[in-house]
């Protein structure tokens, strides 16, 4: 009987020990699983967190880099645009040829005008020569500015044909000089008017076209003035060439006629002076060449 009780007690103790062992194993497994899960979650969280941090860092950096790059490209594009805008377009060969010829002609007009102002025997010729110096000097300055903006180098000396003409006129004097100079001015300005009229309608470059158009009216005025002065030096007034005998043949009427003629000449001189002043004023308003 006592032996059975002992066996049962031992069995019970064994079962209790087994139960504790199973419980311990279960607790160990649960702890491990929890720890693993926690570790895994923590690891994932840290990874995600790190990834999020990295992403957040790379995001602004990428945006900043892209924005900066785009800004740099925009600046470069702007600079390129400005450079392109400031660069002058290529000039048509016909426009360039016109600029060069106009510059040569302008220098010749100034040089010969100075010569006329010095050597002219007629006051009208002297005044015309000075007018050429003043008007063409201004136009030459305008043309220099246009040529510079287009990258065109202008001649700095007279053309060979203009030098020959200057030398030819330099050897003349008095009425002979006046006639030769005015003949040349009439022919030269006829050619100038035709050239400027053609360029004003056919020029490709707007600046060259504007220069030709604004200068043309002044050249036409120069031509009219040259023609009238040319006629004046070739056909001087006959009043001053009246013979002394005819003037004294009849003291009363002769004196009256002489006074009348003198008054007429004075009036004509005054009108001529007024016309010259008016022409000068008009030329100043229209632009000069």
Image (spheres, grey):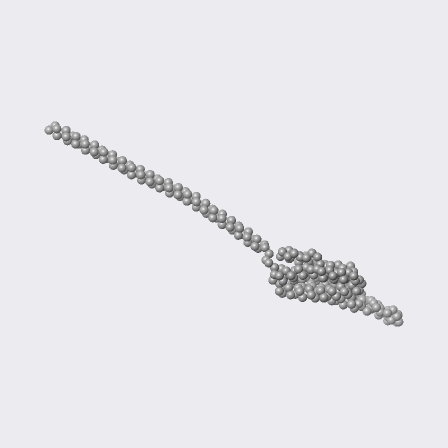
Expressed as whole percent of the image width and height from the top left, the position of residue 67 reads: 48, 48
Expressed as whole percent of the image width and height from the top left, the position of residue 26 reads: 25, 36
Above or below — where is 8 with respect to 220?
above
Q: Quadrant of the N terminus?
A: top left
Instruction: Name the residue at 69% across, 56% down.
Output: 156
In the image: residue 3, left or right of residue 187: left
Q: Quadrant of the C terminus?
A: bottom right
User: Which of the 4 quarters of the picture holds residue 122?
Assistant: bottom right
Q: Residue furthest top?
A: 2
In the image: residue 196, left or right of residue 238: left
Q: Nearer the viewer, residue 266 or 44?
A: 44
Above or below — where is 69 with respect to 246?
above
Q: Residue furthest left?
A: 1
Residue 11 seen in the current view: yes
Q: Nearer the viewer, residue 228 or 276?
A: 228
Instruction: Name the residue at 64% across, 65% down.
Output: 198
Q: Nearer the viewer, residue 88 or 206?
A: 88
User: Which of the 4 quarters of the picture holds residue 285?
Assistant: bottom right
Above or below — where is 18 with respect to 154?
above
User: Which of the 4 quarters of the picture holds residue 90?
Assistant: bottom right
Residue 270 seen in the current view: no
Numbered marks: total: 0
In the image: residue 16, left or right of residue 180: left
Q: Nearer the viewer, residue 209 or 257?
A: 209
Expressed as whole percent of the image width and height from the top left, the position of residue 17 reads: 21, 32
Expressed as whole percent of the image width and height from the top left, the position of residue 5 reads: 13, 29
In the image: residue 259, left or right of residue 33: right
């Amino acid at each position: 009987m006592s032996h059975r009780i002992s066996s049962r007690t031992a069995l019970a103790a064994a079962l209790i020990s087994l139960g504790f062992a199973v419980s311990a194993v279960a607790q160990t497994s649960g702890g491990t699983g929890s720890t693993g899960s926690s570790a895994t979650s923590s690891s994932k969280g840290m990874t995600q967190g790190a990834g999020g941090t990295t992403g957040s860092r790379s995001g602004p950096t990428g945006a900043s880099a892209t924005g900066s790059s785009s800004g740099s490209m925009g600046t470069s594009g702007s600079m390129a645009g400005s450079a392109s805008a400031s660069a002058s377009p290529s000039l048509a060969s016909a426009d360039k040829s016109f600029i060069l010829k106009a510059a040569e002609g302008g220098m010749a007009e100034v040089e010969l005008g100075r010569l006329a102002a010095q050597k002219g025997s007629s006051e009208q010729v002297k005044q015309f020569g000075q007018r050429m110096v003043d008007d063409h000097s201004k136009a030459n300055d305008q043309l220099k500015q246009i040529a510079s903006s287009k990258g065109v180098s202008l001649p700095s000396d007279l053309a060979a044909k203009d030098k020959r003409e200057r030398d030819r006129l330099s050897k003349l004097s008095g009425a002979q000089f006046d006639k030769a100079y005015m003949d040349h001015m009439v022919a030269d300005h006829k050619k100038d008017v035709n050239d400027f009229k053609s360029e004003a309608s056919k020029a490709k470059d707007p600046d060259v076209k504007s220069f030709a158009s604004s200068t043309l009216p002044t050249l036409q005025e120069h031509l009219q003035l040259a023609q009238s002065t040319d006629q004046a030096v070739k056909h001087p007034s006959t009043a001053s060439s009246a013979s002394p005998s005819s003037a004294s043949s009849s003291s009363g009427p002769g004196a009256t006629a002489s006074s009348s003629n003198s008054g007429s000449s004075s009036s004509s001189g005054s009108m001529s002076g007024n016309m010259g002043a008016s022409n000068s004023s008009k030329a100043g308003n229209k632009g000069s060449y």
